[in-house]
Image (cartoon, helix red, strand yellow):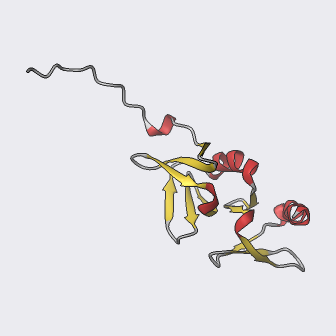
Amino acid sequence: MEIQNLPQLPQIPLSTISIKIVTLLGRQYLLVPDQSKIRRVLINDIVRLEGMKNYTLLHLRNGNTMLSSRTLKVYDEILQKVDFLRIHKAHLINMKCLRNYDESQHQYAVMQNRDIISISRRKRKDFQERISMK
């Protein structure tokens, strides 16, 4: 039996694939384009995201990190719908993973993984409003 040459499927560059939220079996996942593939990350496992110029570093509950070639702005637009808040130009946090914060002046947030993140002056009002809603 002879193997026929099948037409090649077009390769889709990862840079054109958008980040999106999908729901599988009642759980929400974020589809994150990585360097060579698309990874599915449970949204509740993301503690925070850190912007690094044109890249974003995702910090997960298990201590692992993932690097994505998308800006923090892209993630901010998608994740603000699912209880994430941008508290600094370089930091987007999962409000469900907020452990503690500076109650007197709202200058920093402490996350479940014990990361301490500065809250910028411009974002303090948004942070105070979100905290008062909980």
Quarter of the picture containing the N terminus is top left
Q: Residue 53: percent from the left, percent from the top? A: 58, 55
In this picture, residue 89 sits left or right of residue 121: left
Residue 72 at what x, y percent from top left? Answer: 64, 52
**Near-viewer residue (83 or 66):** 83
Q: Position of residue 51 (x, y in %)?
A: 61, 58
- In this image, 3 relative to 29: left or right? left
Instruction: Name the residue at 75% across, 56% down.
Output: 83
Q: Residue at x 75, y 63 (%)?
A: 95
Front residue (pair 6, 130): 6
Question: Which quadrant would the C terminus be assigned to in this image?
Answer: bottom right
Number of numbered discs present?
A: 0
**Residue found at x 65% / y 79%:** 114
Q: Quadrant of residue 119?
A: bottom right
Instruction: Name the residue nearer the viewer: 59 or 74.
Output: 59
Residue 105 drawn at (x, y percent): 88, 77
Height in image: 64 above or below 83?
below
